[in-house]
Image (tube, grey):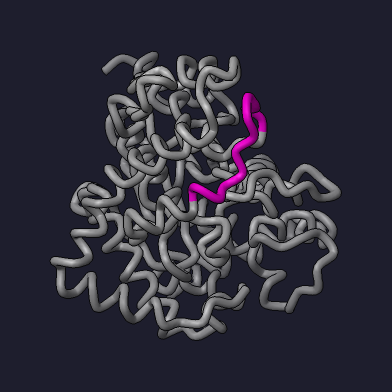
């Protein structure tokens, strides 16, 4: 596979690459660079965790990348996820692995790493201290938004370690490409700045789009706070479609989703179609009575978007089509958890955990 094709595979899902020229140079000199994505184990998996991440990962693997899936158990601990109970957090991490399997990720082709194992080494903490010497308290505080916290929010001392630990992960795992969401941008940019100061290998960042919740855009004082408030969150059932939702639950949630007529901006159902559904399905089929134009299929996003914005597709019809499309993608994962004893037990256990933040 030539370099242009490899770069395009990343551009297919990345909202931002810092920088594309560096990515191109990397592929010219390294056939199998190392990339990672990290997750705090907490709560039930929503569709962006299962479907969007799986799509991104498939593209990365096609490009020849060696991929590391990072289960950030101690990050969830300091961030008070699941009440800061490490045992429960690690059970949630095992459940996450089963979600990846249910979504078609071949876990033999990726390396799964736990923070607890990475941190069990003096070199990790040596790097953390060296990094922290290069970062001011003010700069560190600005980066705490990567935890889903607002600027100015009251934080524990443990939470103040979070940005430095995340930057340490990148260098400890010898990462070439940080493949995380736009909400993690500040940590990756901080890592690039630290790399320059310490003369370490500078990581490239490929940030994917953050999927908004069913409620649409939730305006806040800053762009970053708006992003955090608007995103689909596994801790907010009103905002999320989960990988275990039944067809009836999917239809109920989507029927009440924000979906303004003829409007693309801030419309979560068009966004799901663009970033999830049409990345995984050949088409979105919408069934309509003949008097309203009859059945129609959309094989690409631009076609769907133009049809909707012109008013040729009613919001109710879009909701029905999106519901059916999600059912087609979620059903195999749902059945995996019904048939796999270990996966089912993990899911039933995690369902009982109290979600905290």
* Residue 90 vertical position relative to residue 276 in the rendered view, above or below: below
Q: Position of residue 115 (x, y in %)?
A: 44, 68
Between 249 and 99, the one lying in front of the other is 249
Residue 208 can be seen in this image: no
| Horizontal arrangement in the rendering, residue 186 relative to residue 312 (left or right) | right
Between 187 and 209, the one lying in front of the other is 209
Between 111 and 41, the one lying in front of the other is 41
Q: Position of residue 201 (x, y in %)?
A: 53, 41
Q: Position of residue 40 (x, y in %)?
A: 49, 65
* Residue 191 vertical position relative to residue 84 in the rendered view, above or below: above
| Horizontal arrangement in the rendering, residue 272 relative to residue 223 (left or right) | left
Does 242 appear in magenta? no
Q: Which span of residues is magenta-colored?
A: 254-265
Name the residue at 46% across, 55% down: 252
Residue 192 can be seen in this image: yes
Name the residue at 32% across, 59% down: 246
Q: Quadrant of the C terminus?
A: bottom right
Q: Quadrant of the N terminus?
A: top left
* Residue 356 vertical position relative to residue 123 in the rendered view, above or below: below
Between 357 and 319, the one lying in front of the other is 319
Q: Position of residue 65 (x, y in %)?
A: 33, 36
| Horizontal arrangement in the rendering, residue 346 relative to residue 242 (left or right) | left
Name the residue at 55% across, 43% down: 211
Q: What is the total number of numbered labels drawn onto the structure image? A: 0
**View extreme (front): residue:** 291
Does 262 appear in magenta? yes
Secondary structure mostly taken by the magenta-highlighted segment of the chain:
loop
Name the residue at 44% across, 21% down: 292
């Amino acid at each position: 596979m030539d370099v242009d094709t490899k770069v395009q595979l990343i551009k297919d899902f990345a909202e931002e690459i810092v920088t594309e020229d560096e990515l191109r140079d990397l592929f010219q000199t390294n056939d199998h660079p190392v990339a990672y994505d990290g997750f705090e184990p907490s709560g039930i998996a929503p569709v962006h965790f299962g479907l969007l991440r799986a799509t991104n990962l498939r593209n990365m693997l096609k490009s020849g990348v060696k991929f590391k899936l990072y289960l950030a158990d101690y990050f969830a601990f300091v961030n008070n996820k699941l009440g800061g109970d490490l045992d429960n957090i690690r059970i949630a991490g095992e459940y996450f692995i089963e979600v990846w399997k249910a979504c078609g990720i071949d876990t033999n082709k990726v390396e799964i790493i736990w923070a607890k194992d990475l941190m069990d080494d003096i070199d990790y903490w040596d790097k953390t201290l060296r990094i922290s010497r290069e970062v001011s308290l003010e700069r560190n505080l600005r980066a705490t938004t990567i935890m889903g916290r607002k600027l100015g929010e009251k934080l524990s001392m443990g939470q103040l370690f979070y940005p430095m630990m995340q930057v340490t992960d990148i260098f400890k795992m010898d990462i070439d490409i940080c493949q995380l969401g736009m909400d993690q941008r500040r940590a990756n940019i901080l890592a690039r700045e630290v790399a320059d100061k310490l003369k370490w290998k500078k990581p490239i960042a490929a940030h994917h789009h953050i999927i908004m919740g069913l409620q649409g855009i939730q305006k806040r004082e800053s762009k970053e706070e708006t992003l955090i408030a608007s995103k689909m969150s596994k801790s907010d059932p009103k905002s999320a479609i989960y990988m275990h939702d039944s067809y009836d639950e999917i239809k109920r949630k989507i029927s009440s989703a924000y979906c303004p007529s003829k409007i693309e901006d801030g419309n979560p159902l068009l966004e799901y179609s663009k970033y999830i559904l049409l990345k995984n399905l050949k088409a979105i089929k919408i069934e309509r009575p003949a008097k309203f134009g009859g059945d129609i299929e959309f094989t690409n996003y631009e076609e769907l978007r133009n049809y909707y914005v012109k008013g040729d597709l009613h919001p109710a019809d879009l909701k029905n089509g999106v519901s059916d499309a999600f059912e087609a993608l979620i059903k195999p994962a749902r059945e995996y958890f019904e048939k796999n004893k270990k996966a089912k037990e993990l899911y039933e256990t995690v369902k009982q955990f109290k979600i905290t933040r």
